[in-house]
Amino acid sequence: MMNKMISRWLLISINIMVLMEIGNCFEGGGVISVKYKFGGMERSLSSLSAHDTIRHLQIQAGVDLPIGGSGRPDAVGLYYAKIGIGTPSKEYIVQVDTGSDIMWINCVQCRDCPRRGYHGLELTLYDPSDSLTSSRISCDREFCKEITRGTSSTCRTNQSCLYTEIYGDGTYSMGYFVEDVVQYDRVSGDLQTKSANGSVIFGCGAGQFEDVDSSDDALDGMLGFGKSNSSMISQLSSSGRVKKMFAHCLDGVNGGGIFAIGHVVQPKVNTTPLVPNQLHYHVNMTAVQVGVGFLNLTTDIFMLGDKKGAFIDSGTTLAYLPELIYEPLLEQILSWQPHLKLRKLHDQYTCFDFSDSVDEAFPNVTLHFQNSLLLKVYPHEYLFSFEDMKCIGWQNSGMLTGDNKNATILGDLVLSSKLVLYDLENQTIGWTEYNCSSYIKIKDELTGSVHLVGAHSLSRGCRLSSKLYLFLLLLSLLQFCLQ
Ligand SMILES: *[C@@H]1O[C@H](CO)[C@@H](O)[C@H](O)[C@H]1NC(C)=O
Ligand SMILES: *[C@@H]1O[C@H](CO)[C@@H](O)[C@H](O)[C@H]1NC(C)=O
Ligand SMILES: *[C@@H]1O[C@H](CO)[C@@H](O)[C@H](O)[C@H]1NC(C)=O
Ligand SMILES: *[C@@H]1O[C@H](CO)[C@@H](O)[C@H](O)[C@H]1NC(C)=O
Ligand SMILES: *[C@@H]1O[C@H](CO)[C@@H](O)[C@H](O)[C@H]1NC(C)=O
Ligand SMILES: *[C@@H]1O[C@H](CO)[C@@H](O)[C@H](O)[C@H]1NC(C)=O
Ligand SMILES: *[C@@H]1O[C@H](CO)[C@@H](O)[C@H](O)[C@H]1NC(C)=O
Ligand SMILES: *[C@@H]1O[C@H](CO)[C@@H](O)[C@H](O)[C@H]1NC(C)=O
Ligand SMILES: *[C@@H]1O[C@H](CO)[C@@H](O)[C@H](O)[C@H]1NC(C)=O
């Protein structure tokens, strides 16, 4: 279990044009301009008129993305969402990740992709030839030029646009881009949604490297909620379908939670500006408070590492701090219980036996950010259970590789049980403590009406194949008979 506490954050997203030769085996299906039916009129999505933009905003208040999973490292440590892709539409379960920028789904061509993943779920592979609306993106498309800026020296007509996504845990996905219709739940009233769709360019995963130990965490793909133009939210918003704002509330206790795209008006959150010129969501951390006291840190410690500022990443499970913050933080936390017998597990996790309630025995840790935004982390959030022990969730980023050394990466450990609002229009991010099993309110920009959006908790067995189900039924009958 412990070695599944991997973190996935994007190191680089490069489109290896020099590997274009690989692309040759995918050649033949490239289409340059794709037409979709919308409102009874055929038009190219890339040239939607201003009128259409307004029309779409009028009917679309927001998007309700049903999520499941749990950020608790002792549970599974990932959140996932369900989306429909293609015509006819099929359902896919994807990991939601604010630390990467594209969406990809494993495709039928993929030989090394796992066929069964998380909790024995049968995985669904996307087959472009099964969808009437699927088309391959060629390398001369604007999308491809932008994503491969600087490296696209050789683009021959009808060649596929390739991608490689490499994550911080050493796993990767590679393949080619396709465009297809994505179905989502549009907010249409209080706790009500209507199915809507939009055309999105995403990766068709033709090759993958997964850590063998983590293959039972495998899902159908990844849904990157990064801020670059290639993410699904950027694509939907550039065609006027959604406002460039989204929020998540990950329920660290019950699992699932709220994930919505749109203008969140309730709860109100305090915000901090995003650090400009960073690929992802980075904010300025200014101080670390343990209980009532502050760690004695110089301000330059918050600017260590290659990537400036603290990285907010829902695709990472734990929270990583530079050694110069991590060491004094642990010292302060542990000073509350000086007689603990500490054990180091997997050279990484500091654990100890502890059976009392942790919330009275250990201090709250409060991270301070620019604009006086606070992030309070309770002992029950930063201490997770492993076997009969408690382990400290704070990690030393000095043990990470490459440019993540000395980085501050804040994952689900600290983001759970908070409504986290990403406002890409104003380039801010904010949060507030919140009950993630309750509701938030989303405003329709044009009509001014406000709708409730509630929590979801996708059932884990939601896609157990009928064969597996029958097998489990027989197995339980057998156990019953043997008793
Ligand atoms: C997408 O939405 C439009 C308009 O609501 C609808 O006519 C069309 O059938 C939908 N397409 C798919 C593939 O569901
Ligand atoms: C590119 O693909 C289109 C559609 O498949 C085809 O009509 C066209 O002939 C191809 N062009 C070249 C140069 O291969
Ligand atoms: C993203 O798209 C917008 C509008 O389409 C454009 O102005 C901007 O330059 C693009 N950003 C990047 C990084 O290419
Ligand atoms: C973050 O901190 C750096 C260094 O102190 C500063 O230059 C920058 O203006 C701050 N704010 C933002 C939004 O980047
Ligand atoms: C804080 O650290 C600096 C050196 O980093 C030291 O000079 C100073 O005395 C410390 N202050 C306190 C209150 O410990
Ligand atoms: C942590 O914060 C909560 C809520 O503000 C408070 O009730 C609790 O006493 C704090 N814990 C400690 C150990 O100070
Ligand atoms: C982190 O930064 C400190 C201060 O600049 C430096 O001394 C240390 O070597 C760095 N650690 C790593 C693992 O790079
Ligand atoms: C975004 O910024 C604009 C202009 O500064 C402001 O009017 C608006 O209220 C801001 N939106 C939010 C959600 O803070
Ligand atoms: C959270 O909200 C749900 C739904 O409104 C409610 O049933 C539950 O009691 C709330 N939990 C807390 C701790 O307030």
Image (cartoon, grey):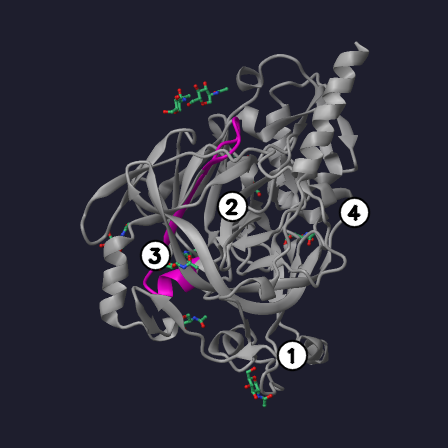
Q: Earlier in the sequence, mark 2 or mark 1?
A: 1
Q: Earlier in the sequence, mark 4 or mark 3?
A: 4
Dot 2 alpha-carbon crowd within 10 angstroms: few under 14, some 14 to 19, many 20 or more: many
* Camera-side mark, 1 or 4: 1
On residue 82, which mark appears? 2
Q: Residue shown at 74%/34% (left/top)?
A: 1
Closer to viewer: mark 3 or mark 1: 1
Among the two numbered marks 2 and 4 on one chain, the one whose residue lies closer to the N terminus? 2
Distance between the alpha carbons at the discs numbered 1 and 4: 31 Å
Q: Earlier in the sequence, mark 1 or mark 4?
A: 1
User: Which mark identifies residue 242?
Assistant: 3
Few, some or many C-alpha atoms within 10 Å of disc 1 (few <14, some 14-19, many ≥20)? some
Look at label 2 and name its amino acid.
Answer: Lys
Q: Tell me, yes or no, whether the highlighted magenta stretch contains residue 252.
A: yes
Q: Is residue 143 above or below residue 76?
A: below
How far apart marks 2 and 1 lie (CA) works out to 30 Å
Q: Between residue 480 and residue 175, name the one nearer to us.
A: 480
User: First in sequence: mark 3 or mark 1?
Assistant: 1
Please provide the residue range marked out in magenta.
233-257
> What whole-number distance in Å separates the C-alpha atoms at marks 2 and 3?
18 Å
Residue that mark 1 sits on: 27
Q: Which residue is mark 4?
A: 212
Q: Are marks 2 and 3 in contact (CB under 8 Å)?
A: no
Label 4, label 3: how far apart the Cα atoms are: 38 Å
Query: Cα distance, mark 3 to mark 1?
Result: 33 Å
Along the viewing direction, whichever of 265 and 374 lies nearer the viewer? 265
Q: Position of residue 273 (x, y in %)?
A: 38, 53
